[in-house]
Image (cartoon, grey):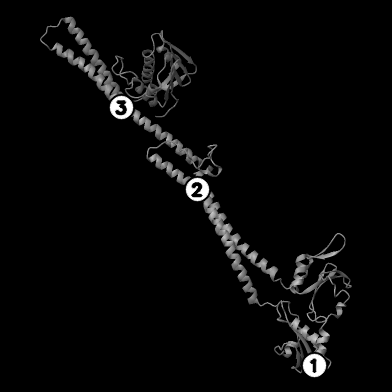
Amino acid sequence: MKQMNLLTLRFVSYFTLFYVAIILAFFITLVIVFGYENRKHSSDILLLEPFEVTDKVEQKNDGTWIFSEGFERQATDNDGELYLMTPSLTLLATTDEACALCDTDFTQLQHRKLKRWDVDDNVVYFVANDPFEGQQQAMMQAVLSNQTSTELQQTLKRTNTTVEHYKEGERVAFIGEQLSLLRPVDFVPTQLLTFEHKENRNIIAQDDGSIVVLRSPNERYRTFDQLMADISKMGLVVFIVVHILLLIGVIIMSLVISSRFVRPVRYILSRIERLAQFDYAKPSKNPLYKAKTKRLKRKYNLYQPVDESLNNLSTRLAYNERQIKNSEKLREEWITGLSHDLKTPLSSIFGYSAMLNSDYEWSQTEVRQFAATMQEKATYMDALIKDLTYTYQLKNKAVTLTRETMDLTEWLQQFSDEDVEVEVTAPAVIEADKLLMQRVLDNIITNAKKHTPVNTRVLVRAMNTTITVQDFGTGIPQEELDNLFERYYRGTNTTSNSSGTGLGLAITKQLVELHGGTITVSSNDTGTIFTIDIPKNHDR
């Protein structure tokens, strides 16, 4: 569940990142478009408020004053200059390097756009440049006298200026290009913004009531449609560029997601497919691990439990397959051995009964020998059948436990003899069925004596709820050790004359497990140890 939450969180983070990238792309587009247009088409300086100008004027440590770079550029784009003055009109700073108006009485300026801002204890003026500066008087005299010099005509042509003379609303003379007639309403002075009037005009009233008008195109004039067209064009370009970059980013993100999720999933599916084909070996190349160190790559940490689970599953399936093969082999051996062990006593019984049933006169001693042998073989067959029945009763939980508290200090002494030594470390108390536990210990101790040399020492220890039976023989081979608790596995050739049914240890394990306990065995060339643990208060 934790890994699923991490996987979900990672997918959510990726798609959230993708969503944020789209939002950022949108805002980046807007910032670039409007930033570019703002630099290309400055806003009208006449619209600035005093609080906006305050941050654009700064006094340096040496006492001099400067304008911000953006403020100077805005003044230039508006075709004018900035002047910082004291209230008494003492100049403190200006953007005009030539300082053309430094000696000018600002109170006498005419035909200029002026804007004033109060900044702290000083005043900032924006003064628009006069497009007709220096030529105004000459142009006015020329149109009034209707006499134009060649030099003036060249100046008018170069500056694209027209000079007109109006009387009583009618145009009586003009010099330069013939433009549309002005109406009386056009003679009323208005304070237009820098970029909103199509042409520059100086309207000069004469003493006789006539009017002289100087007209030239305003190169900074732009319509709203033009502005929007420029913004749209720039916006389209930026939109395409930004979204191409966004597309590249999406492709890169898709490759990252593919690397982080698709490749591991493909590897996991291939592992599952190999498991389905009974191939349990680990792949030689694992994309989740580094080639050199064989350690999991950091970006695949999420899949470590999955990979470990697949490895464990492969190991388990391989083990199960070996167990199945071993079980098949043991089953065949079990059937072969059981058939042989039943056939041998049956053959003896059949042979002796046939001999007794013959016409030959057997002596009383021979008859008793035949009968004893037949009885021995029948007893063995009966024990074998009873053990088989008992194992199936245990398997189907048809055996009833009668639990009682057993003090092992006293109870284990019954197994002590010249070959068996008992050691108990108190307290050693279990809750178990005495008869069944006696059968368990009898089976293990009997096997220890039977399969070790004569007079080999057997040590029985007990502490708490654990009982160990240790012999000091030559040990048990690993192949036999793996199958020691299998039904009818005797660890010897079935043709041998070893007594016993071969079911003793299988029944022992079932009886221990019936008590809710465990039994394990370990062996080496110095002997074998059986360990039995019966927990207290175990509910069936």
Q: Position of residue 119 (x, y in %)?
A: 82, 68
Residue 428: x and y in percent read: 47, 18
- Residue to which mark 3 is pinned: 331
Picture layout, residue 403 above or below residue 369: below
Q: Nearer the viewer, residue 221 or 487?
A: 221
Three-letter amino acid code at the position of disc 3: Arg
Q: Which residue is mark 2?
A: 261
Q: Tell which of 165 and 330 is nearer to you.
A: 165
The kind of residue on which mark 2 rests is Phe
Q: Residue at x 63, y 62 (%)?
A: 28
- Residue in view at x 86 percent, y 79 percent: 107
Tell me the SS state at disc 1. loop
Left or right: 432 as drawn, with respect to 176 = left
In this rendering, position of residue 138 left or right of residue 521: right
Residue 146 disc label: 1
Q: Secondary structure at mark 3?
A: helix
Q: Earlier in the sequence, mark 1 or mark 2?
A: 1
- Residue 329 can be seen, yes or no: yes
Mark 3 and mark 1: Cα distance apart in space: 134 Å
Q: Earlier in the sequence, mark 3 or mark 2?
A: 2
